Amino acid sequence: MTPEALKVVVATHNSHKVAELQRILELQVPGIHLLAYGGPAPVEDGDSFEANALIKARAAATETGMPAIADDSGISVDALGGAPGIDSAHFSGERDDAANLRLVLERLGDESNRSAAFSCAAAFVDPLDTDAEGRAFEHVALGVWPGRIALEPAGVGGFGYDPIFVPEGLDVTSAELSADEKNAISHRGRAFAALAAVLRERSRRGDS
């Protein structure tokens, strides 16, 4: 295998996420090519971002027989007791970005404490690399992006809660940043930057 042949499936049905991860990783893992995994979604019954990311990566690796990556991310709002947290994607009861962020704003109301943080757990599972007991190689990295919740949505970039999240040190929402600006500092960018070192090692081993 050469670095140009490093193919990894991404355990998501979200095309925006695949494109975002490709932009993030190709700068740090030359030649990586991410493939969307369109198979059945596993039940995400973990109690943390890390656990759910591993559930998805394991399922994709098992179904395809290929190395797989997955992430699980969400936003935790201090004044809401850490909610939505791992329930971020379905906070309103459905997978609807607009409805989810509206509910966060409604729950906060005129609350003065609007501190929040995005978290992302990035998991990698390689079924082609097993230990003596047949267990696939696994690694998980966590990235956290602190900030606050805006009073109202702003910006048209990104997705999910981006229009109401103001990153620490900035006065614009995540949705008002360019893709490159966001990827350089976001929770997902931080998690996958950490995971990139593991992926580079796999690439070097395959080229040896």
Image: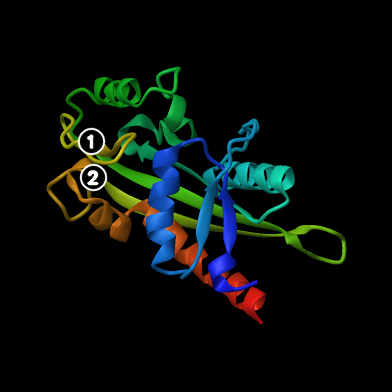
Look at the picture and state if 80 lies above or below 168. Answer: above
What residue occupies the far bottom of the structure in this picture?
A: 208
Q: Residue at x 44, y 36 (%)?
A: 85
| Real-space Cα separation, disc 2 to disc 1, in angstroms | 6 Å
**Camera-nearest residue between 204 and 177:** 204
Dot 1, crowdedness within 10 Å: few (<14), some or many (≥20)? Answer: many
Q: Amino acid at mark 1?
A: Pro
Look at the picture and state if 197 lies above or below 45. Answer: below
Look at the picture and state if 155 lies above or below 205. Answer: above
- Which quarter shows the C terminus? bottom right
What's the mark number on residue 163?
1
Q: Residue at x 58, y 50 (%)?
A: 9
Instruction: Determine whether the residue tagged by mark 1 lies in a helix, strand or loop.
Output: helix
Look at the picture and state if 47 lies above or below 94. Answer: below
Q: Are marks 2 and 1 in contact (CB under 8 Å)?
A: yes
Residue 73 image offset from top left, x and y in percent: 45, 43
Of label 2 and label 1, which has the lower sequence position?
1
Q: Residue at x 43, y 32 (%)?
A: 88
Residue 108 image offset from top left, x and y in percent: 25, 26
In the image, taking residue 170 as reference, residue 180 lies left or right, namely: right
Residue 126 image offset from top left, x and y in percent: 68, 59
Q: Which residue is mark 2?
A: 174
Q: Quadrant of residue 8?
A: bottom right
